[in-house]
Amino acid sequence: MAYPEYRARRLRDHAIFREMIAETTLEPRRLVQPLFVKEGLDGRAPIESMPGQSQLGLDELVAEARRVCEAGVGAVLLFGIPAHKDAIGSSATDTEGIVQQAVGAIKADVPDLAVICDVCLCEYTDHGHCGVLDERLAAALARRAAYSAEAAASAAKAGSPPPKQDRTVDNDATLERLAEMAVTCAEAGADMVAPSDMMDGRVGAIRDALDAAGLEHVPIMSYAVKYASHFYGPFRDAAENPPKFGDRRGYQMDVRNGEEALREAAADLEEGADILLVKPALAYGDIIRRIKDVFGVPVAAYSVSGEYAMVEAAAARGWIDREAVINEILLGLRRAGADILVTYWAAEVAARLA
Ligand code: PBG
């Protein structure tokens, strides 16, 4: 059927029919609200690059969790900012650590809210990387320093940038730390854990550790596909976790790759992931769709800090219709195939939908 037999406008021109045939829906039950809890903070500290979002002290965190729950949001995703940071991120696995305390406080006061803990070391390490550093590699690089200096000089002469190699994260040593963090969070009462570190094998390590601790009922939402993205900029203010040297491209995914996302997703499912998360969201609708189509499992999309900041900044200047744009972004992610939306707008949108 083609024009003039087919007229797409027939169903568009009538508001009731438009509603009848709408394919995609947005419901509060699909939303997850990220929250930042900071050890030793009294009250709240606004995050400059994320207007409307704050770091929260423990008391404020519980109050905020109550508001989020009352708005109809099902779950919060917790990030802890500890008072003490060191090379191995000791505070991440402290049973009295800030995030473990936070889980307990929320579960005691707002039992109807599900608590998901982000599992990663970057907020807890003094170097800001998502795992413990590979000391063997550091030593090997030091031995090669003379060679590197020579290579850099000849590259400079040839007009190309000098070869760059940073110290990196020790994958397998990090797995133990992550597994321990997941267990302490789950023992504190977390309803789900969400590893965001991008080490190889961490879903399996966490699953094994949870099961060994009698926590086989706790699901894993894996950041299976997490890109080395510049959209995380504002988050690094919020979580106080920028790497002190180098960057995260040694473990997070290359923005140019889509096939690799499928391999990452397959590996995490094989290791026991219950939900696959794609992050960032806005520029990655194709990845969300491919993962949903190929694996047919629950998929979450994380609309990250930079996406939030862009919308808030443009809206503050009156350049876009803020609420309409937020709805359009979230609906777009649903249309791409996301079942769950992790968004800093969760509570606001849920309250509006109610
Ligand atoms: C790392 C982590 C990051 C985010 C969530 N978990 C940042 C990073 O990888 O540097 C980013 C979230 C956002 O930008 O909103 N644990």
Image: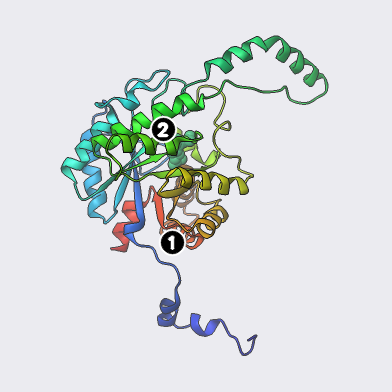
Residue 123 horizontal side relative to residue 284, left or right: left
Which comes sooner in the sequence, label 1 or label 2?
2
Q: Where does residue 322 sit, x and y in percent of width and height? A: 43, 56
| Residue at disc 1, CB closer than 8 Å to ligand 1 | no
Camera-side residue of 16 and 313: 16
Disc number lying in front (1 or 2): 2
Furthest residue in direction front, as rendered: 212
Can you say which quadrant of the picture contains the N terminus?
A: bottom right
> Where on the picture, by quarter, is residue 208?
top left
Residue 214, above or below 326 = above
Camera-side residue of 122 and 203: 203
Q: Judge whether residue 123 can be spotted in this image.
A: no
Q: CA distance from mark 1 to mark 2?
A: 34 Å
Residue at coordinates 45% horizontally, 42% vertically from top-left? 271
| Residue at disc 2, CB closer than 8 Å to ligand 1 | yes
Q: Which residue is mark 1?
A: 324
- Inspect the image, locate mark 2, and give the three-letter code of the amino acid beneath it: Cys
Q: Where does residue 301 sit, x and y in percent of width and height? A: 45, 51
Residue at coordinates 40% horizontally, 66% vertically from top-left? 25
Camera-side residue of 62 and 324: 62
Query: Around disc 1, counting alpha carbons within 10 Å, would you say few (fewer than 14), some (14 to 19), or many (20 or more)?
Result: few
State the SS at label 2: loop
All told, the count of numbered labels is 2
Residue 285, above or below 233 = below
State the SS at label 1: helix
Residue 345 horizontal side relative to residue 107, left or right: right
Can you say which quadrant of the picture contains the C terminus?
A: bottom left
- Inspect the image, locate mark 1, and give the three-letter code of the amino acid beneath it: Ala
Query: Around disc 2, counting alpha carbons within 10 Å, would you say few (fewer than 14), some (14 to 19), or many (20 or more)?
Result: many
Q: Which residue is mark 2?
A: 120
Q: Where does residue 32 sit, x and y in percent of width and height? A: 35, 50
